[in-house]
Image (tube, rainbow, N blue to C red):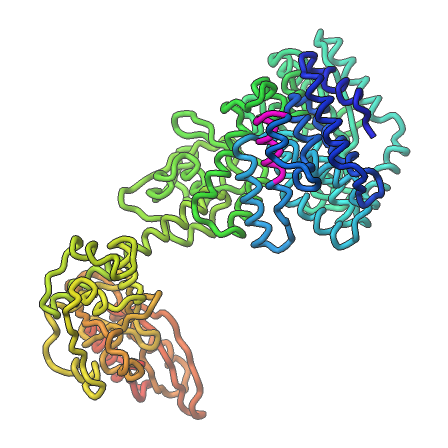
Amino acid sequence: MMRQYELVERVKRYDPSADEDLLNRAYVYAMMAHGTQKRASGEAFVVHPLEVAAILTDLRLDAATIVAAVLHDTVEDTAATLEEINRIFGPEIGSLVDGLTKIKRLDLVSKQAAQGENFRKLLLAIAADTRVLLVKLADRLHNMRTLGFMPPEKRARIAQETLDIYAPLAGRMGIQEMRDELEDLAFRNINLEAYETIATRLASIEDRNGRLIEEVEDGLKAKFAANGVEAKVVGRRKRPYSIWRKMERKSVAFEQLSDLYGFRVVVEEIDACYRVLGIVHTSWPAVPGRFKDYISNPKQNDYQSIHTTVIGPGSQRVELQIRTREMEEIADFGIAAHSQYKHGSLGADSRAYQWLRRTVDLLAEGDSPEEFLEHTKLELFHDQVFCFTPKGRVIALPRGANAIDFAYAVHTDVGNTAVGAKINGRMAPLFNELFNGDEVEIVRADGQTPPPAWESLVVTGKARAAIRRAAKAATRRQYAGLGHQILERAFQRAGKAFSDEKLRGALPRLARASADDVLAAVGRGEMYSGDVVRGVYPDYVERRPEIHEAPLARLNGTATPADALPIRGIGGDLPVQFAPEGGAVPGDRIVGILTPGVGVTIYPIQNPALAAFDNEPERWIDVRWDVEAGAGRRFPARLLLHSINEPGSLAQVAQVIADHDGNIENVAMQRSTPDFTQTTVDLSVFDLKHLNAIMSELRAKPAVNKVERITG
């Protein structure tokens, strides 16, 4: 267990001005508060917060964060109170302890929805002060180091959660060493057999290759010295989880991996990084496709380095990371390396902080917890590609992102109005995957609404949230538009005046927050139009038709109501669909049935399915066709043909439909007798005249015995 003087010495080593008295008081307070409490391992409970504090001293964090780490379990697990922490240690430390206490109360479980909701709470808890996240990561790291004392089922759950959330978060914050250790510890607990197999093979290779790392280090140092470059070269073997992930990603066996060792070259200045790169590439053959410049294009966690792979000394593949000392510090300590952070706050110019803020902003977009977790995982796990706008702005995206993701990364309005893209000056589909260095120009059109299908094409959480939000808004506008038309006609039939102002005055009686809510509810079929009329005019008495006066009987007259809802087809401003069996075409006498949550379904009045709605007159909507001749819109119809079973009979049917510019959507054939076949043809036509012409021509064919239209 770390002694009191050791805690002070560790902090003073990198921060001589640290408040020694504050550290001493925190140590004593934690010892007294935890008293005789024990962990699952049997050791004193206070060992855990002290080890968490030790991990954070390795990151060189400020004294307030170290004190918060020492105290982080006191409010939750002892008699200590937050008020007492605030009084003794001040509001800054009290706020940190409060955030950590709230996180600890989250019961993170493996169920997707609960895990997603708690992940949202985790991010909200760390949004005010990112130091809370750093303490939580250190807390998780020590818990993972001592996970062996937990029951097997709990071990597996915590390890999976670490792999899903905490290790990627450490990576996003730029703390790569912590991420690597978290991943390895989780991997060992999730798949011990695979971990031990890889670790054994790595040890075997190291024994077989002897001083390989030292030889490569010496060879590189000699080259640099000969060219007048002072550089520190450090080599290391890659970790088991890193190797396992590469084997899975590339679908290769362990024996096929050649770059099992990595080397860091650390220099003083940025220009020396490129001099080192030149020396390396002129001394040994570079491996194609293995060069990345994260100095000119830093990662979103502020990581900067040049990556390259060469066939180095002894014909070994050598993976090199070339960086300055400052870049090395950021690579090791991530977000904690920022000088602004040492004074208690994180600078807004930190890319890692900006990513965290954007992710927290997504919480307001209305995603479900499991969707939020899924989207955030995607952004946590994906490597990056760097693309450019025509003006040279760099847009960093997850690997696998496409032009739609790019458009939303530029601005939500750009994504919502995107209709096409130019990639490197050439027109390309919006769903084309982007690669490093692509220049992307988004083609926009005013009034465009993103199709809901885009949601399945994008990979970034921001794009998915924006597309879903736009789709919901468009659907709501459709339902509100339908509701407005239904109410206009309902008020007209009642002989009452209708206006948005009158509707707003009736909101308390209708139990809705806004007029738009009423309109959308009517359009969705959740509120009957007659109830709205009575809500606006309480003295209105509606005279509904008697049951024996079925709506269908009323519609069998010759006149179409003047206030009927105009129907122009599907895919417009109203949520309209056609009857599932047979559809309807202009020229048919039609009726609409309002279905809650669906909209209006259009039926020909001869459709027998309408009888099922005779006792629900409030669902019947007067509709009329509003389609101009020659508009080119097609509508669904279904034909049933009885034809002779002979070669070419189906070809004759298809040829007739094609000659008349009809479009076959689906064909189903069934043998009725050995000599005859029954064929159901779903097709789309312009109107009833067009359909009748096709039917007339089909009847004239020798192979066709009978043609009839199916309307339900």
Which span is picked out in magenta? Answer: 89-101
Picture layout, residue 49 above or below residue 196? above
Task: Estimate the x, y position of residue 284 in percent, counting from the top left.
Answer: 72, 22
Task: Estimate the x, y position of residue 607 in percent, counting from the top left.
Answer: 27, 81
Residue 110 inside the magenta-drawn segment: no
Q: Quadrant of the C terminus?
A: bottom left
- Going by the image, does 147 lie left or right of 493? right
Frontmost residue, 119 versus 289: 119
Frontmost residue, 251 versus 526: 526
Task: Estimate the x, y position of residue 121 in percent, counting from the top left.
Answer: 55, 43
Quarter location, residue 597: bottom left
Res 311 seen here? no
- Going by the image, does 512 lie left or right of 282? left
Res 450 seen here? yes
Picture layout, residue 140 above or below residue 85? below
Residue 100 inside the magenta-drawn segment: yes
Q: Main secondary structure of the magenta part?
A: helix
- Going by the image, does 677 lie left or right of 30? left
Taking the spot 58% from the left edge, 22% from the top edge, the residue there is 344
Kindly give the residue lying farthest to the top in the view shown. 228
Taking the spot 15% from the left edge, 73% from the top edge, the residue there is 541
